[in-house]
Image: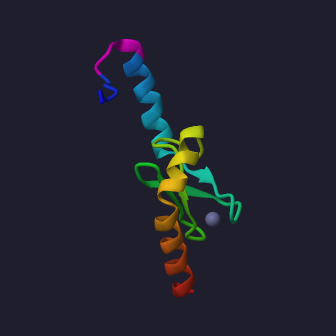
Amino acid sequence: MAKWSVRHGASLRKRYQAVLEQKRDTYVCSVCGKKAVRRISTGIWQCKHCGATFAGGAFTPSTEAGKAVERIISRLAEGAAAQAAEAK
Ligand SMILES: [Zn+2]
């Protein structure tokens, strides 16, 4: 399967820059409400405040595609949540 490339012209590169900006942002946690959710891995987001882990888009926490990803890694997310509960 052909992968999306960033080398397809200026407009796409500009868009990629915008995506990189999004990656650095923090997002509001749907569990604790703090703006502390950061991307920890591709499609995986974690709240630095309460430790909640979310499956989402590669560059933003919530996308339509993210819902499919969420199903795939739900077990992983559950494992992280269990670890967070143990740590309390
Ligand atoms: Zn939180």
| 15 w.r.t. 22: above or below | above
Is residue 9 part of the magenta span, yes or no?
yes
Q: Position of residue 70 (x, y in %)?
A: 54, 53
Q: Residue at x 46, y 49 (%)?
A: 43
Question: Is residue 2 shown left or right of residue 55?
Answer: left
**Number of numbered callouts drawn:** 0
Q: Residue at x 46, y 33 (%)?
A: 19
The residue most toward the right is 33
Give the main secondary structure of the magenta stretch.
loop
Q: Position of residue 8 (x, y in %)?
A: 31, 16
Q: Which residues are magenta?
A: 7-11
Is residue 13 part of the magenta span, yes or no?
no
Question: Split into 4 quadrants, where in the image is the N terminus?
Answer: top left
Q: Nearer the viewer, residue 82 or 61?
A: 82
Q: Position of residue 23 (x, y in %)?
A: 46, 43
Question: Is residue 45 shown left or right of residue 2?
Answer: right
Question: Is residue 5 shown left or right of residue 78?
Answer: left
Ligand 1 sits in quadrant: bottom right
Question: Split into 4 quadrants, where in the image is the C terminus?
Answer: bottom right
